[in-house]
Amino acid sequence: MKTQSLFYGLFLSLFFLSLSQRSHAQVAFSIHGTGVTSTLDDAKVKPGVGIAAKMYFSPRVALGVSAKYLGLAYDEHQSLGVNLRNKGSIVPLTGMFEYYLTDGFIRPYLGVEAGAYLRTVKVDFQGEQVAKQKDTRFGAAPKAGVALSFGGIGVFAEGSYHLLFGNKNGRTTIGSTTNINWQNPNRLWAVNVGLTFGFPRTNE
């Protein structure tokens, strides 16, 4: 799995670089911190981190891919008189589109992200893992934010609203679009603050 992820990462990087050379578009990379509130199974979501690779086809239009890591924590509970603690993570792997309303120093923008949300939940007993469950869901997140341009570096803050759709028949993988349960999605409110390196300059 790690080898496959590395392969896809290298492939996407080479694709962006090749496309940039051919179209004179601009490649950029972002890193950010994330704060989240959730309705996901009564879980408490911890602060997380994220990275993204983007292609700016103009100062106002960007396409890219992103990955985030969000920790999950649950209240301790009892089962058969034994105290158990659940913890886990959500890893969204998404494509993204962003449209900037201006190309000056202050740039408000709108966007959307969509893709696979990988969730892992572990059950611990006295510090030892006794169970583990994984599932993959389809998710989408409209977002709005503002970026400040500082000579090729962008400082941004954005809010996003993630919708995580379940899988039909309790399956643990998406499989196809026909397996997505579009009703009663879980929701994540997120605020991201970070930096973009390779941000289009105001004079471009």
Image: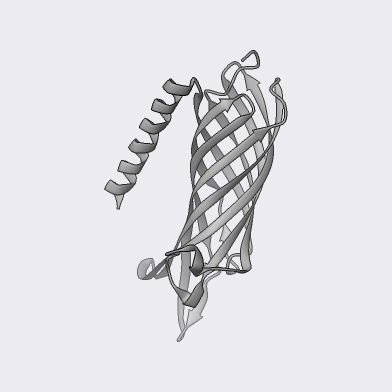
Q: Residue at x 34, y 37 (%)?
A: 11
Q: Residue at x 55, y 50 (%)?
A: 114
Q: Is residue 19 above or below residue 180?
A: above
- Farthest residue, direction front: 22
Q: Residue at x 48, y 77 (%)?
A: 169
Q: Nearer the viewer, residue 97 or 80?
A: 97
Q: Quadrant of residue 158?
A: top right
Question: In x, y percent, where is residue 6?
Answer: 32, 42
Question: In x, y percent, where is residue 161?
Answer: 66, 52
Q: Quadrant of residue 43?
A: bottom right
Q: Is residue 26 above or below residue 122?
A: above
Q: Nearer the viewer, residue 7 or 21?
A: 21
Left or right of 195? Residue 144 is right
Q: Nearer the viewer, residue 126 or 157?
A: 157
- Farthest residue, direction left: 3
Left or right of 101? Residue 71 is left
Question: In x, y percent, where is residue 18?
Answer: 39, 26
Q: Quadrant of the image for the C terminus? A: top right
Q: Nearer the viewer, residue 125 or 194?
A: 194
Q: Residue at x 63, y 60 (%)?
A: 187
Q: Is residue 170 above or below residue 12?
A: below
- Farthest residue, direction bottom: 80
Q: Is residue 155 above or below residue 175?
A: above
Give the total of numbered labels. 0
Question: In x, y percent, where is residue 91?
Answer: 47, 53
What colouring style does the render use?
one colour
